[in-house]
Structures are given as C-alpha cells and as structure tokens.
Image (cartoon, rainbow, N blue to C red):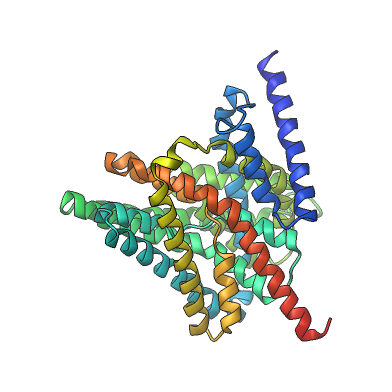
C-alpha cells in the first residue's frame, strides 16, 4: 500500500473516532476531549499500536496549527468593553491561580525532598493550562452567562501568566545550578514575551482593516487561517510563543475590527477537525513505561497542582468580590493541562540533563489532567447552570 493511501485511510479513521467521541460527549458525562485522548492511548504504542510509523511526522505540525487557531479564537475574549465589565475578576483569579499554583507546587516538592532547581521547574510548569480542551467543553456544554465568559477570559490570559512564571522560575533554577547563569535566561524569557506580543500586534492591525475588505461580503476562512498561520510561523521562526502571538493578534482584531466578527467564526469552522487529530495524538504520545518509574512524584505533582488551582481561584475570586461558590467552581474548571506544559518541560530538558525526568512526569500528569480535567470543567459548568436555573425558577 502506498504512503498516500495509508495516510488518507488513517486520517479517515481518526475523523470517525472524532464522530464517536462526539456521540459519547452528547450522551454520557464524559467530555469528547477526554474520549479522544483515551482513544489515542488505545491505538498508540501504549495500547494496540494500530497507527503507521509515519504518524510521528504529523504530530508537531498538527499541534502547532490547532493551538495557534485556539490562541486566535481566545483573543476574542480580550474585547476591551467586555474586560471592563469583568476585568477585576479575570485578573484577580488568573493571577492568584498562577502564583499560588507555582509557589505551592515548587514549595511542596522541595519540602518533600526534590532538589530546589527541579522543584522550581515543576512550579514554573504547573500554572500552564489547556485552552483547547477548556474552550471545547464550554462549547459542548452550551452554558451561557458570566461564569463561562469569565472562564474563557481566564483561560486566555492564564498561559500568558504561565509563560512569565516559567521564565522567572527557570531563571531561578539556573541561578541555583550555575551560580548566576539565570540572568541571561530571565532576559531571554522577557524578550520572548515581548517579541510574541509585538508579532501579534504588528500582524493584527493590518488583519483588522484588510480582512473582509479584500473581497466583498464577509471575510473568508482563507483569510482568517492565512493570517493565523503567518503569525504563528513568524513566532516559531523567531523562537517566540506562537500561542501568545496568535492570542494577541486575535485580541487586536476583536478590538480594532468594528465592521465584522467573521474572522473568528470562519476559523471556528475548521477548529473541531484539527482538535480531533490534536487530542488523539496527545493520547498516542503517552509512554506507560514511565508511569511506575515516577508514580509517586506524578501523584504528588497532581495533588499539589489541584490544591493550587482551588486555593488560588477561591481567594482570587473572594478578592474580586465573587461568591465562595463561584470561586470554588472556577477552581475546578481550571484543571486541564496539555501541550504547553510539555513544551515547557522539553525546554528545560534540552537545557540541562538534570531536567530530563521532568518530561516523563509532566507527560503522565498531562494525561491525567487531559482526561480528568475536562470532566471537572464540564461538571462545574453544569452545576453553575443548575444553580442559575434554580435561582430563576426555571
């Protein structure tokens, strides 16, 4: 069988798994994102190993495309008018969650015996979230109102805080290991954030004015995806964060392009097929042999991160004047963690051999949070919906 035939058949098979996952999501308590990851584990090397070897060539580019598209769509959450309505809540909860999670995980692991540099790396990775699965669960749940809107905004800004926290903690870890070598990394982290934002702004301004006017009528999918790919490509070329760049570009379009909203709707049209492949590949990449080797550390990391999310969201919400119920359910909604965390772990591992084990631990913890996290998010959304219905008497 030719490579092309095998590739097309494999893609068709994966898309049909997406249909099955969608049916599961609509008829059971299990979100379709979690189902896709489990499917990936079963058909990958950790399961029955049904996929061709060439699939490894698809995974990086599909992940980049899916996350860049998600980043652009999340940028729509940064509409200035909307932020003015809930800006204090979003900033307060997101900052508290990021800082409490980072400090809690790093401090907890250090007190339990991890070396300080390794504990700092885990602490820097812990705040990272998974915007893709969170957005998908919100759409699937069809819950409307302040809670899901706030969750979307927090998810959008959470990874920006995560990048900053990781850069600072990675620098601190290197200072501890190299006795002063972290200043260069700290400046590099600040530079990465600046370049990412700069790319998003520079490309977002012309997109705001040109898209939808290149041809009559509403802007097309070609225009939207074209700009998303160019933006993420430039970011990758300059070793910046393509997710942050795409997010900033989406925010610029949301605030500058007053004549339409269709760039977001157009990209949404291909979002789910990309996510089907993305989440299946996340399951395929799982290597179960690392599970028993680092089981205790994985469990401790998971428990500390869960505690950090709940505590941070609770006190961040109370600081913003939200109810204890609102804050508690928000903490449960912020559990998913995926590709960005793995990217951070690989960055650390590529710099120092001592951090190689971090990749294995984060990979297995990611599987847990990608399977259990969307379930937690969906449960919280449904409880908020039920509470709102009870208050209105519906």
Quadrant where the N terminus sits is top right
* Count of numbered tags: 0
Dividing the picture into quadrants, the one containing residue 101 is bottom left
Could one spot residue 306 in this view of the protein?
Answer: yes
From the viewer's perspective, tell me whether residue 182 is left or right of residue 147: left
User: At which x and y percent is residue 81?
Assistant: 63, 76
Could one spot residue 256 in this view of the protein?
Answer: no
Compared with 78, 62 (above or below) is: above
Quadrant where the C terminus sits is bottom right
Residue that extends furthest to the top in the rendered view of this protein: 1
Q: Nearer the viewer, residue 253 or 358?
A: 358
Compared with 56, 362 (above or below) is: below
- At 71% from the left and 35% from the top, the residue drawn is 14
- At 47% from the left and 44% from the top, the residue drawn is 363
User: At which x and y percent is residue 291?
Assistant: 45, 42
Residue that extends furthest to the left in the rendered view of this protein: 179
Dividing the picture into quadrants, the one containing residue 206 is bottom right
- At 40% from the left and 68% from the top, the residue drawn is 99
Q: Nearer the viewer, residue 367 or 5?
A: 367
From the viewer's perspective, tell me whether residue 266 is left or right of residue 208: right
User: At which x and y percent is residue 374?
Assistant: 62, 57
User: At which x and y percent is residue 130?
Assistant: 55, 55
Compared with 180, 326 (above or below) is: below
From the viewer's perspective, tell me whether residue 191 is left or right of residue 32: left
Q: Nearer the viewer, residue 341 or 72?
A: 341
- At 63% from the left and 35% from the top, the residue drawn is 42
């Amino acid at each position: 069988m030719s490579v092309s035939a095998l590739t097309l058949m494999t893609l068709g098979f994966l898309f049909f798994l997406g249909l099955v996952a969608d049916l599961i999501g609509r008829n059971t308590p299990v979100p379709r994102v979690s189902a896709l990851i489990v499917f990936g584990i079963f058909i990958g090397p950790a399961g029955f190993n049904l996929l061709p070897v060439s699939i490894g060539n698809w995974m990086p580019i599909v992940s980049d495309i899916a996350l860049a598209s998600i980043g652009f769509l999340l940028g729509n959450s940064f509409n200035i008018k909307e932020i003015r309505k809930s800006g204090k809540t979003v900033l307060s909860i997101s900052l508290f969650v990021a800082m409490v999670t980072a400090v809690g995980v790093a401090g907890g692991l250090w007190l339990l015996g991890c070396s300080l540099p390794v504990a700092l790396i885990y602490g820097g990775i812990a705040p990272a979230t998974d915007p893709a699965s969170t957005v998908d669960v919100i759409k699937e749940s069809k819950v409307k109102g302040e809670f899901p809107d706030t969750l979307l905004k927090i998810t959008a800004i959470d990874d920006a805080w995560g990048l900053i926290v990781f850069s600072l903690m990675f620098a601190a870890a290197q200072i501890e290991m190299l006795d002063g070598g972290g200043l260069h990394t700290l400046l590099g982290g600040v530079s990465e954030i600046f370049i990412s934002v700069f790319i998003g702004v520079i490309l977002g301004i012309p997109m705001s004015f040109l898209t939808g006017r290149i041809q009559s009528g509403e802007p097309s999918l070609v225009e939207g995806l074209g700009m998303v790919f160019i933006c993420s490509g430039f970011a990758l070329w300059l070793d910046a964060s393509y997710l942050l760049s795409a997010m900033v570009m989406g925010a610029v379009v949301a605030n500058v392009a007053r004549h339409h909203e269709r760039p977001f709707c157009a990209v949404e049209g291909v979002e789910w097929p990309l996510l089907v492949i993305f989440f299946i590949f996340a399951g395929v990449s799982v290597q179960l042999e690392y599970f028993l080797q680092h089981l205790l550390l994985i469990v401790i990391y998971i428990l500390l991160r869960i505690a950090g999310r709940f505590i941070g969201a609770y006190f961040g919400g109370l600081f913003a004047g939200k109810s204890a119920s609102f804050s508690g359910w928000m903490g449960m909604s912020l559990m998913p963690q995926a590709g960005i965390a793995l990217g951070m772990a690989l960055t650390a591992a590529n710099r120092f051999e001592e951090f190689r084990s971090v990749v294995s631990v984060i990979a297995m913890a990611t599987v847990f949070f990608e399977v259990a996290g969307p379930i937690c998010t969906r449960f919280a959304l449904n409880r908020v919906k039920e509470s709102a219905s009870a208050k209105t008497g519906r």
